[in-house]
Amino acid sequence: MPYNGDPALVRPVAGAKEALDRLRGAGLRVGVLTNQSGVGRGMITGEQMLAVNARVNELLGPFDGWFICPHAPDEPCDCRKPKPGLIFDAANLWGIAPSEIVVIGDKASDVEAAHNAGAQAIKIDGTCDIVAAVMRIR
């Protein structure tokens, strides 16, 4: 749900928890890289965003990191996808090269951010077997 500031409205996609747990079980780090322009646009507060993220973490976590761009599209920053800043942040935190990261996303900006960072990308549409796709890359 775009610009969601209410944790009660978080509804994971069917099978998401199981897929994430399979990736974790395979020894992979799992993080969230997200543009949150609702904060920068004043549509939600930073506190609301953190509460929603906490609910996502409760339902789908644990995550090995949250990498968030809170800026509006017209604000200058290095983190808003398709810029690579969030991927570089994850690589730095995890002590790995960006090329070892696989970005899974449903938007062209996710794929472009991965390419801009030298990472790998998988674009999903809801029907993709994420675990199989990641394991093929790995």
Image (tube, rainbow, N blue to C red):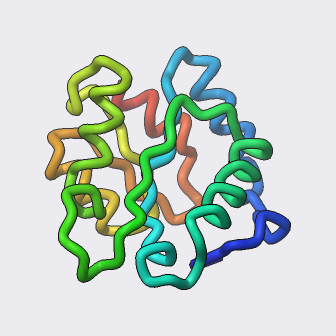
Q: Is residue 66 above or below residue 45?
A: above
Report x, y in % for residue 69: 38, 59
Residue sitting at x 47%, y 67%: 36
Report x, y in % for residue 122: 37, 49
Looking at the rendered structure, the number of numbered marks drawn on it comes to 0
Report x, y in % for residue 23: 58, 28
Report x, y in % for residue 28: 50, 22
Q: Is residue 18 above or below residue 80?
A: above
Residue sitting at x 70%, y 51%: 56
For this rendering, which residue is in front, 32 or 93?
A: 93
Left/right of residue 57 with respect to residue 132 in the rendered view? right
Left/right of residue 106 with respect to residue 53 in the rendered view? left
Residue 51 sits in which quadrant?
Answer: bottom right
Residue sitting at x 49%, y 73%: 39
Q: Residue furthest right?
A: 8
Question: The C terminus is located in which quarter?
Answer: top left
For this rendering, which residue is in front, 25 or 39?
A: 39
For this rendering, which residue is in front, 17 or 35?
A: 35
For this rendering, which residue is in front, 57 or 22?
A: 57
Q: Is residue 100 above or below residue 88?
A: above
Residue 134 sits in which quadrant?
Answer: top left
Question: The N terminus is located in which quarter?
Answer: bottom right
Left/right of residue 124 with respect to residue 84 in the rendered view? right
Residue 137 sits in which quadrant?
Answer: top left
Residue sitting at x 37%, y 45%: 103
